[in-house]
Amino acid sequence: MQSSVLAAGFVVLLGVPALFASPAAAIPQKEKTAAEQTQPTPPPVDPGKLVWPAPPDVARIKWLAEVSSQDDLTPPLPKQKKKKKKGWMDRFAGISLPEEADRKALALSKPFGVAADSKGRIYAADTARGAVFVFDLQNKKVEFLPAKFLTPIAVTIDDADRLFVVDSRQRLVSAFSSAWQPEGTFGREHLKRPVGVAIDNENRFLYVVDADAGRLAVFDADSFAFLRYLGRPSDPLDPESGTFSLPLGAAVDEDGNVFVTDTMNDRVQMFDADGNFIQMFGKQGVTPGTFMRAKGIAVDRDGHIYVTDAEFNNVQVFDQEGRPLAVFGTRGTEPGQFSLITGICVDANNRILVADQWRARVQVFRYVTDEEAEAQRKPAGTPGVGATRRADSAPGQ
């Protein structure tokens, strides 16, 4: 397998279609022989050693944790002795034990959008629970955003910790202060089925992705005033630049450029802060740099672009030119694997948050920045930028 190292330090992946093959496209496996069936089961992967790319390359992505419920933050309560059966008066009064009811309720069901605030708290919009979960890892507790939603699907947080939650069914955006106080709702007259949201902190633009309308609605993040639309629906026979077919996600980089996952067109489009088209990359396929069901998108502090794909159940990483740099994740239920991957976010602490919908969890990874990777690379005497060498594209497991 060929590979080369770009200035970003990620390994470009070439010729690895097996990483992208869906089960339907996979080669059928022969039945196991009796000898194979008696082989010992491989030991479970140590999550603490999950890194991408694998050694001897400098790791750029590290698996940290997963969160789904209160039990992930504090151990479950010890089982109590069997209690006396409730009488009819207890049932009538609706008495319920906290360990039986509350802890179960504090568990994700279908997370979609994810975000994080400056305190490191993780927010997950859960479409099945009709709530926005808040995982406070430092204080080891799970809370809910104190508001009523029907189908909260996306969430973003600005640099002052103000929150914006998109409710797809209500066709609304709800704004909250950093103290979770409601500031207002807006957007219904301009939205058909909003599914994604992104904040431009510098220009104070709030981009709301509208899947059914095939465009983005742009609002003032402070006054909530509608400003303009970005894009229009695609012609299925001629999907021009600046047009969309079922867009699902958006992200903004530090220069105010906005990136949009144009899902049914199997591409990512990039625009400047004025709405001018800059470039696009991607096409349908099963090799690095191609998509089948691109959903979430995020940008890290070094400008790398992360795209989740629900068909491949992985995350692809690109540079600003749209060249594929790395991939992590695959279909499965173990740490570092996904079952219907959806939203993604890279926070200010270089954590990558990924919503894993069918497993009802958010997985947390650590992005090793360009500066950190370069500092690790120098003492080891590894080749400098632009060198060519062999590298393994699979995760270190």
Image (cartoon, rainbow, N blue to C red):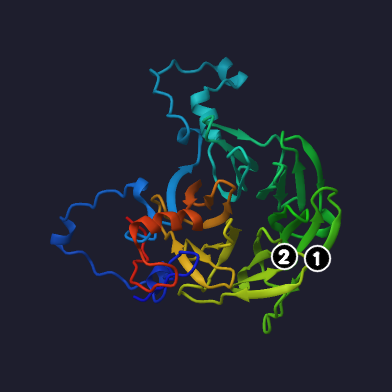
Packing grade of label 2 (10 A; few <14, some 14-19, many >=20) is some
- Location of residue 77 (image quadrant): top left
- Residue 369 in view in this figure: no
Mark 1: few/some/many CA within 10 Å (<14, 14-19, 20+)? some
Element class at badge 1: strand
* Residue 376 in the image, given as x and y percentages of width and height: 40, 54
For image coordinates 66% across by 75% down, the residue present is 279
Secondary structure under the numbered disc 2 in the rendered image:
loop
Q: Which residue is rendered at x = 68% and y = 84% of the image? A: 238
Nearer to the camera, 266 or 212: 266
Q: Residue at x 71, y 43 (%)?
A: 149
**Which quadrant does the C terminus fall into?**
bottom left
236 vs 295, left or right, is right
What percent of the width, then of the height, locates residue 158?
Answer: 70, 47
Say above or below: 394 vs 177: below
Disc with the residue nearer the chain's start (2 vs 1): 2
Residue 329 at least partly seen: yes
Quarter-of-image position of residue 302: bottom right
Q: Amino acid at mark 1?
A: Tyr
In the picture shown, does residue 281 fall above or below 256? Answer: below
Between 203 and 192, which is closer to the camera in this rendering? 203
Q: What residue is rendered at 36% in x and 61% in y?
A: 57
Query: In the rendered image, which residue does mark 1 sit on?
Result: 229
- Residue under label 2, please give it: 212
Q: Quadrant of the N terminus?
A: bottom left
Looking at the rendered image, the disc whose residue lies closer to the viewer, 2 or 1, is 1
The disc at residue 309 is none
Horizontal and vertical percent position of residue 262: 64, 69
Q: Quadrant of residue 298?
A: bottom right
157, 151: nearer the viewer? 157
Q: Nearer the viewer, residue 172 or 91?
A: 172
